[in-house]
Image (cartoon, rainbow, N blue to C red):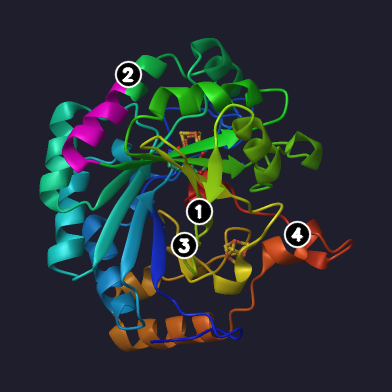
Amino acid sequence: MIRDKLSRKFEYLRISITDKCNYRCSYCMPSDVFGSNHKFLKKDELLSYEEIIYIARELKHFGLRKIRLTGGEPMLRKNIQLLIGKLKNEAGIEEVHMTCNGSLLSKENIRELKRSGLDSITISLDSISKHIGKKLNPTHTDNKKVIDNIYHVLDHYGTLKLNSVIIKNINEQEIIPIVNQFKNDNVNIRFIEYMDVGESNNWDKDKVITSNQIKKIISQKYSIQQEPTIKSSTSEKWILNNYAATLGFISSISKPFCNDCNRGRLSADGKFYTCLFSTFGHDLSNHIRNQDREMLRLFFQNIWSSRIDQYSKLRSIANHPSNNASKIEMSYIGG
Ligand code: SAM
Ligand code: SF4
Ligand code: SF4
């Protein structure tokens, strides 16, 4: 077990297994920036599955017990079920989860993912309407397929988390349709405040709809009630009275949760980031590739024990130096 300078444990690793995506969501990979000239990582720069398993096994030594596979779009990596099986059975990671955009799932691959030991699937969906979906993401053509896949995941897993990013004047009118669609299902519908990640999404705080504003919109139609929140959870849980679905609110902008942040992030090419808003990553790839266990452990021990990140908490302080630093893209660092 290891603690950082603010006494926060390291328990959770989010791994971006590819920086590529078949979507171009405007808040993450806008198509004018991530166009045909954008240089994605080359195949030989990506960590192999064996290398990811090696690092997971080593970081378990420091308290790692939960991994989330993300990206980019994680379902673009071939045979992801082999990685999941080995993370659970060889590296001994207690929980392995995945966040994906739902477009590349099918009844068959969901069954395989479950069989390999994947503990849960989170799907991102920001609108029910195809027309509004297009405004957020010009490559998003098939909401129906994603919605069908949400039901296939429910068939296999019994439950699912849904992520919806809400942006002012773009998709706030989709809040109620999303709740209407899934209210009778065992879905945790999580509304995420639009965040200032990366440098390419033209973020502006006036485009943020806060969790409180979203709650107000929902409570005009539904009766909702707050539940106690688990420490270290990024999401505030609410009950939708009389329905099966629950609500979650991820308030990175209006109510930061840095005090309990127990997570690190690994990019697809092996750089470790101590915060979603880090300006640089610690390159673990040499230690992984040389299988230099002692050096890797020493290196990681130094990184985590000197960690002081609290970006979301400090961003509201006017003129704080972190506000001007250049940030890493979410698709690279793993959302
Ligand atoms: N492609 C997968 C997906 O969309 O689920 C996994 C990677 S994506 C970067 C992970 C999550 O980050 C998604 O739920 C997405 O909505 C969220 N995300 C990306 N950019 C964001 C932003 N600027 N603000 C808030 N959430 C964001
Ligand atoms: Fe792709 Fe996910 Fe980013 Fe959308 S949010 S562009 S689906 S990585
Ligand atoms: Fe953790 Fe950084 Fe997000 Fe704060 S801003 S919760 S430290 S990832």
Q: Which residue is drawn at 15% across and 51% down?
A: 82
Q: In which quarter of the image is the N terminus?
A: bottom left
Q: Which amino acid does label 2 sit on?
A: Lys
Quadrant of the rendered structure where residue 26 is?
Answer: top right
Q: Residues within 10 Å of mark 1 (few under 14, many from 20)?
A: many
Reading the chain from its start, which is encountered first: label 1 or label 2? Answer: 2
Reading the chain from its start, which is encountered first: label 2 or label 4? Answer: 2
Asked whether, in this view, residue 331 is left or right of residue 14, the answer is: right
Q: Label 3 CB, ligand 3: below 8 Å?
A: yes
Q: Do the residues labelled 1 and 3 touch (CB within 8 Å)?
A: yes
Q: Magenta stretch: dominant SS?
A: helix
Q: Label 1 CB, ligand 1: below 8 Å?
A: no
Q: Can residue 107 be seen in this view?
A: yes
- Separation of residues labelled 4 and 1 (CA atoms): 16 Å
Asked whether, in this view, residue 142 is left or right of residue 173, the answer is: left
Q: Which amino acid does label 4 sit on?
A: Ala
| Magenta highlight range | 148-158
Q: Do the residues labelled 3 and 2 touch (CB within 8 Å)?
A: no
Q: Are marks 2 and 4 in contact (CB under 8 Å)?
A: no
Mark 4 lies on residue: 325
- Separation of residues labelled 2 and 4 (CA atoms): 39 Å
Mark 3 lies on residue: 265
Q: Residue at x 61, y 34 (%)?
A: 219
Tell me if residue 31 comes above or below residue 320 in the rendering: above
- Separation of residues labelled 1 and 2 (CA atoms): 27 Å
Mark 2 lies on residue: 145
Mark 4 lies on a secondary structure that is loop
